[in-house]
Amino acid sequence: MARKARVLHPGAACHDLNRGDRRQAVLAGNEERRRGQLVPDHSVEMRAQAGWVRAEAIMTEEMTRLRWKEDEWSRRAKNDPHKPALAARLRRETTLTMAQIAERLLMGSRKSVAPKLHAWRKAHE
């Protein structure tokens, strides 16, 4: 049976964590995960999940702006000018790796994406 949360001052945050079943850390709710607002203290799995949620939100925003459908990514060439721009934004604003970005944007391997991303950043940033 879990103990009650310690409250030193009403409304104040306590540095102790309440633990869930089998002493698992209870660090963030679904709302924080959905918004991608996690801090370094959160578990790796939660940060990865928040990164993917944030990446999907960015991609949806870009597809809306470009008036693309989901299947447009597979129809466009690997070096389509919109893909490196989106890859740079995903790399800057999320925790996704180059391999994950390459897979999601259908740009080939991480080794082929890195030079394209470097060239795009050099020209645009």
Image (cartoon, rainbow, N blue to C red):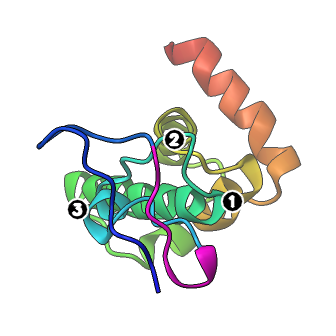
List the residue tagged with mark 1. Answer: 100
Question: Residue sitting at 38 percent across and 60 percent down?
Answer: 28
Whole-Å distance between the Cαs marked 2 and 1? 19 Å
Nearer to us in this view, 65 or 89: 89
Q: Position of residue 1 (x, y in %)?
A: 47, 87
Residue 41 position by quadrant: top right
What amino acid is labelled 2 in the image?
Pro
Question: Residue sitting at 17 percent across and 38 percent down?
Answer: 9
Whole-Å distance between the Cαs marked 1 and 3? 24 Å
Q: Position of residue 100 (x, y in %)?
A: 69, 59
- What segment is highlighted magenta in the picture? 16-23
What amino acid is labelled 3 in the image?
Arg
Disc nearer the start of the sequence (2/1): 2
User: Mark on residue 67?
Assistant: 3
19 in magenta: yes
Mark 1 Cα shell of 10 Å, populated few (<14), some (14-19), many (≥20): some
Whole-Å distance between the Cαs marked 3 and 2? 15 Å
Q: Is residue 50 above or below residue 95?
A: below
By secondary structure, the bulk of the magenta-drawn segment is best described as loop
User: Mark on residue 81?
Assistant: 2
